[in-house]
Amino acid sequence: MKDEFESYATGLTAPARDADPITPSDANDLPAATRAIYVGETGSLQVRMVSGQTVSFANLQAGVIYPLRVAQVMATGTPAGGHVGLR
């Protein structure tokens, strides 16, 4: 497949180039920091941002992409599933 945009720099507002399913864990970081997270199920999300700050987001809606630079998604405080990390 030809990618006419292959030589362009990928900015934070550009479409994602890679994606990983997110398995929440209280012990492990994600394989790579995210540029955004696709939320698969409505609910809360507790994360550690790339800055190191831990934050809980409540009432996130399913089917929405949230622009979050995240290093870890915690199992505690993240009851919903189906999340995808976008890079």
Image (spheres, rainbow, N blue to C red):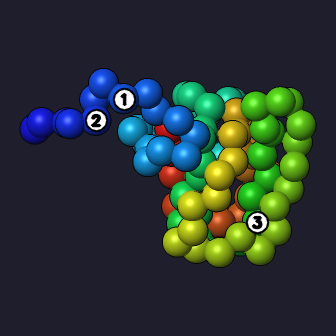
| Image location (x, y in percent) of residue 16 | 44, 44
Residue that mark 1 sits on: 8
Picture layout, residue 22 above or below residue 65: above
Picture layout, residue 69 above or below residue 79: above
Q: Name the one closer to the observer, 23 or 56.
A: 56
CB contact under 8 Å: marks 3 and 2:
no
Tell me the residue at 64%/58% (across/down): 66
Q: CA distance from mark 3 to mark 2?
A: 35 Å
Tell me the residue at 40%/38% (across/down): 18
Left or right: where does residue 33 sit relative to residue 56? left
Q: CA distance from mark 1 to mark 3?
A: 35 Å
The amino acid pointed to by label 3 is Ser
Residue that mark 2 sits on: 5
Picture layout, residue 68 above or below residue 8: below
| Image location (x, y in percent) of residue 36 | 59, 48
Mark 1 Cα shell of 10 Å, populated few (<14), some (14-19), many (≥20): few
Residue 65's tag is none
**Circle nearer the N terminus (3, 2):** 2
The amino acid pointed to by label 2 is Phe
CB contact under 8 Å: marks 2 and 1:
yes
Residue that mark 3 sits on: 44
Q: Secondary structure at mark 3?
A: strand
**Circle nearer the N terminus (1, 3):** 1
> From the viewer's perspective, is the residue at label 3 or at label 2 nearer?
2
Q: Residue furthest left?
A: 1
Q: Quadrant of the N terminus?
A: top left
The amino acid pointed to by label 1 is Tyr
Q: Secondary structure at mark 1?
A: loop
Left or right: where does residue 10 sit relative to residue 62? left
| Image location (x, y in percent) of residue 26 | 77, 39
